[in-house]
Amino acid sequence: MRTDAAAEIKERLTAAQVAELYGFPPGRGGFIRCPFHAGDDHGSLKLYPGSKGWHCFGCGAGGSVIDFVMRLFGISFRQAVVRIDIDFGLGLDLTGRRGAPAERSALMEARRLEAQEKADAEDRYREIAREYRYWWDCKKYFAPSFAAAASQLHPLYAEAIKRLPVLQYMLDQAEQRIGR
Ligand SMILES: [Zn+2]
């Protein structure tokens, strides 16, 4: 939700307009009976002009027009902004492309983690590729020039034969993780 949607509401709607739409028409001097404390027969809640909001001299409640709607319906800030936008037909931009600060930082954290995972996967891929290359060279360099018994094989050649299929598999897995 764009934070300036809330600012626009406070700018465009007076406390009197909002209170009246929801069933509390202001009396003399801009007072209404307070819906937030019981037994307010005389009307202790003052609705201020412009964007100054409201204040109840009986219970001390007060705030912006958004606070009024939040309290009246027991809804969240975001819900109140949406409700006011609909009820007054304001046509505000509530797409939330920019996001609230909490949503923004969560998104940034997710992006950071994603980038970190990708970097780790690439490091891992390079590491496995290096090892694969080493054993591939061993296999080539120490390959017997004639058919030899297992006991006569160069130890690095024997080791390479054992390791290369495993490394090949690990390399394929690592490749898939970095999307190659
Ligand atoms: Zn009150």
Image (cartoon, grey):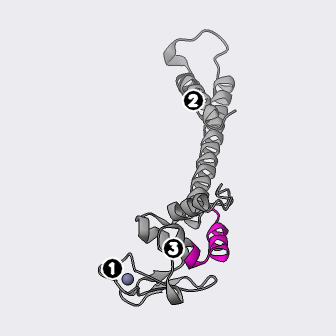
Secondary element type, mark 3:
helix
The secondary structure type at the circle numbered 2 is helix
Which of marks 1 and 3 precedes in the sequence? Answer: 3
Q: Residue furthest left?
A: 39
Amino acid under label 1?
A: His
Q: Depth-wise, is mark 2 or mark 1 nearer the camera?
A: 1
- Taking 65 as reference, is 161 above or below it? above
Q: Choose mark 3 or mark 2, whichever is in front.
A: 3
Q: Position of residue 95 (x, y in %)?
A: 65, 54
Mark 1 CB in 8 Å range of ligand 1? yes
Q: Which residue is mark 3?
A: 19
Q: Residues within 10 Å of mark 3 (few under 14, many from 20)?
A: some
User: From mark 3 to mark 2, how far is it between C-alphas?
Assistant: 71 Å
Q: Amino acid at mark 2?
A: Leu
Q: Residue furthest top?
A: 147
Whether the residues at callouts 2 and 1 have beta carbons within 8 Å, the answer is: no
Q: In the shown orientation, is residue 79 left or right of residue 146?
A: left
Question: What residue range appears in magenta?
Answer: 1-17
Question: Hey, which quadrant is residue 35 in on the image?
Answer: bottom left
* Residue 174 against residue 38 in the figure, above or below: above
N-terminal-most mark, 2 or 1: 1
Q: Quadrant of residue 72?
A: bottom left
Specify the amino acid type for callout 3. Answer: Ala
* SS label for mark 1: loop
Q: Position of residue 151 (x, y in %)?
A: 49, 17
> Which of these two is toward me, 72 or 2?
72
Quadrant holding ligand 1?
A: bottom left
Residue 167's disc number: 2
Q: Is residue 44 above or below residue 87?
A: below
- Give me the C-alpha separation between circle 2 and circle 1: 73 Å
Residue that mark 1 sits on? 37
| 12 in magenta | yes
